[in-house]
């Protein structure tokens, strides 16, 4: 009788979609991934990147990224700007993960300490009912970003786009309810059908089961759509045993093009889920 084979190393692959990002923009994240690979010996850590930047945009090269990662495996591809969700879907296919592997969708402006993330990875890996988990997300000033929300509504989106509306009686209270701002994010596991897409940990099985991001979105609300579909599959939670730092840049508040993209995404979301006023 042959002895049993040792268990296969579970892989954790980060997925990153870039557009006009320079190396300096993503160095903190690359350093965090490299440190995780060095400290989390029970995981095989890798990074898959899709760069939709136009030619000669001064973007980071595959060689420059690999140099920052040292020995961490990297799969890097370039192409047209196909949007956030479709870029991650392509990354998922390129990673060729097994069902029990972990797939992490991350924004470029994220960083973390391995000790702050490994407990969350272990929790997702050991809980098959967990479809998607987000860590506690804080800004580089340490302020909590309330990232476990109720499903989008017209009012919540208006308040996010025009914060001045919070001066209207009742709107600030509604905004706090929508973002679960009254909950203890640092202590509570918060179940939510709408987790911020800045950092999501999923089993490859769950991501595959829902078909990944809906390709109809280009940018904005694709995270609301994905986590809502995942919530029908299993637990979708903010779990504070993990913690990441998000250097948040609210581009949709500065760019007319991104505002138009947000409006288009609202129409897509409304066609799939409805978009109530409240």
Image (tube, rainbow, N blue to C red):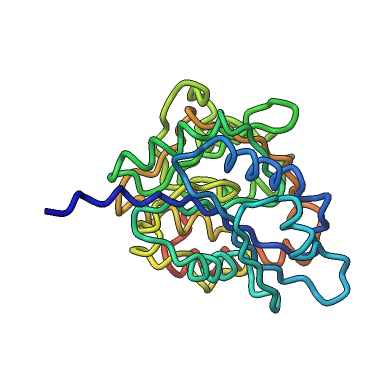
Toward the viewer: 175 or 149? 149
Q: Is 265 situated above or below 73?
A: below
- Residue 251 in picture, x, y percent from top left: 76, 54
With 88 as the anchor, is 193 left or right in this view?
left
Residue 22: which quarter of the image?
bottom right
One can see residue 263 in this view: no
Q: What residue is drawn where x is 34% and y is 44%?
A: 130
Number of on-image labels:
0
Toward the viewer: 143 or 181? 143
Q: What residue is drawn where x is 40% and y is 49%?
A: 9
Extreme residue toward the left, this view: 1
Q: Is 164 situated above or below 11?
A: above
- Residue 194 in picture, x, y percent from top left: 47, 47
Q: What residue is drawn where x is 56% and y is 58%?
A: 221
Residue 165: which quarter of the image?
top right
Toward the viewer: 81 or 162? 81
- Residue 24 in picture, x, y percent from top left: 83, 50
Toward the viewer: 150 or 33? 33
- Residue 275 in picture, x, y percent from top left: 48, 58
Q: What residue is drawn where x is 87% and y is 70%?
A: 57
One can see residue 133 in this view: yes
With 178 as the anchor, is 259 left or right in this view?
right
């Amino acid at each position: 009788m042959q002895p049993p084979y040792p268990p296969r190393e579970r892989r954790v692959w980060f997925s990153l979609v870039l557009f006009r990002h320079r190396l300096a923009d993503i160095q903190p994240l690359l350093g965090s991934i490299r440190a995780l690979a060095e400290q989390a010996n029970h995981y095989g850590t890798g990074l898959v990147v899709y760069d939709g930047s136009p030619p000669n945009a001064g973007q980071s090269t595959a060689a420059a990224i690999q140099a920052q990662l040292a020995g961490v495996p990297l799969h890097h591809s370039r192409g047209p700007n196909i949007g956030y969700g479709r870029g991650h879907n392509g990354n998922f296919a390129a990673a060729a993960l097994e069902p029990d592997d972990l797939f992490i969708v991350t924004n470029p402006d994220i960083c973390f300490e391995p000790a702050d993330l490994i407990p969350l990875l272990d929790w997702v890996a050991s809980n098959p009912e967990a479809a998607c988990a987000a860590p506690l997300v804080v800004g580089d000033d340490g302020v909590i970003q309330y990232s476990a929300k109720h499903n989008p509504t017209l009012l919540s989106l208006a308040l996010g786009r025009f914060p001045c509306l919070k001066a209207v009686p009742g709107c600030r209270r509604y905004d706090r309810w929508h973002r679960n701002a009254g909950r203890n994010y640092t202590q509570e596991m918060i179940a939510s059908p709408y987790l911020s897409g800045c950092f999501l940990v999923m089993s490859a099985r769950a991501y595959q089961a829902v078909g990944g991001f809906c390709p109809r979105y280009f940018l904005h609300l694709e995270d609301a759509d994905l986590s809502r579909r995942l919530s029908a599959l299993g637990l979708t939670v903010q779990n504070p045993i993990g913690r990441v730092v998000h250097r948040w840049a609210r581009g949709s508040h500065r760019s007319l093009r991104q505002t138009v993209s947000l409006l288009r995404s609202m129409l897509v979301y409304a066609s799939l889920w409805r978009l109530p006023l409240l």
